[in-house]
Amino acid sequence: MKVNPELIESGADAGGGRETLADQAYRLLEDRIVRLELAPGARFTEQTLGAHIAMGRTPVREAIQRLVDDGLLLVFPRKGVMVTLIKPQDVIQALEVRLVLERMIAANAARDADVAQRQALARCADQLLAAAAMHDVDAYMRADRAFDVELGRVSGNPFAVRAVGPLQTMARRAWFYFTRNVDLLPAAERHAALARAVAEGKVYEAVQASDQLVFHIRDGLRRVFDS
């Protein structure tokens, strides 16, 4: 099965609308931070970040502010910005909060999703499994983000989605930094279990699958941190 780049890199934001230039700049910079192309501790100017994604000053400036709010960048007045370091304790605490929000999102999605939404989420899970089978880390990371976006859209709660987004990104970056290849298939299978529960409208099972996914991420990172 081929990974569909149109599904992974959609032109819509999490709310289903078209992306603005600032949205695009944010998504592109976030992706480069998560996949460590912009490494933890690295410093950049506004201009060099714009050059990374071939975008102009205004959307990049807006994206930088959002990334600062997400905890991915630090601003040094008149000295540019720095990609934040990955702090294990911060990641674990963020996952504790994410666990609660993800339960709400999963339950809402299983209860309220229509047929087309359930099918879209299942396709996202298929993309994850395909990327894992090919050991394609970059495709997996993009499919993982697409899954989170689609599940949030299906849940119908924009407040929970906005709250959980930075927490998902923090965990995704830490996972990419510490575990990557060794965890592709197990993580993809847990995403697929969540997608199946939502697709079948099973609220309790969806919440349990959501918990298992977050526990899997948390426990894997803890093992790395402890070692």
Image (cartoon, rainbow, N blue to C red):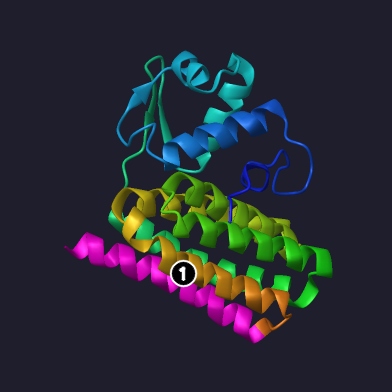
Residue 143 colored magenta? no
Q: Where does the N terminus fall, quadrant-wise?
A: bottom right
Q: Where does the C terminus fall, quadrant-wise?
A: bottom left
* Residue at the image point whose x is 65% and y is 78% from the top: 197
Residue 68 visible somewhere in the drawing? no
Return the x and y of residue 170 as percentages of the image width and height. 44, 51
Res. 60 image quadrant: top right
Q: Which residue is mark 1?
A: 214
* Furthest-left residue in this view: 227
- Residue 104 vertical position relative to residue 176 in the rendered view, above or below: below
Return the x and y of residue 20 as percentages of the image width and height. 72, 30
User: Please, what secondary structure does the residue beneath circle 1 have?
Assistant: helix
Q: Residues within 10 Å of mark 1 (few under 14, many from 20)?
A: many
Return the x and y of residue 46 as percentages of the image width and height. 48, 18
* Boundaries of the magenta span: 204-227
Return the x and y of residue 184 as percentages of the image width and height. 41, 60
* Residue at the image point whose x is 56% and y is 52% from the top: 143
Horizontal arrangement in the rendering, residue 217 relative to residue 211 (left or right)? left
Q: Assign the magenta stretch its main secondary structure.
A: helix
Residue 173 visible somewhere in the drawing? yes
Task: Tell me the amino acid under the disc marked 1.
Answer: Val
Task: Give the total number of marks visible in the rendering.
Answer: 1
Q: Nearer the viewer, residue 92 or 129?
A: 129
Q: Nearer the viewer, residue 102 or 190?
A: 190
Horizontal arrangement in the rendering, residue 44 relative to residue 104 (left or right)? left
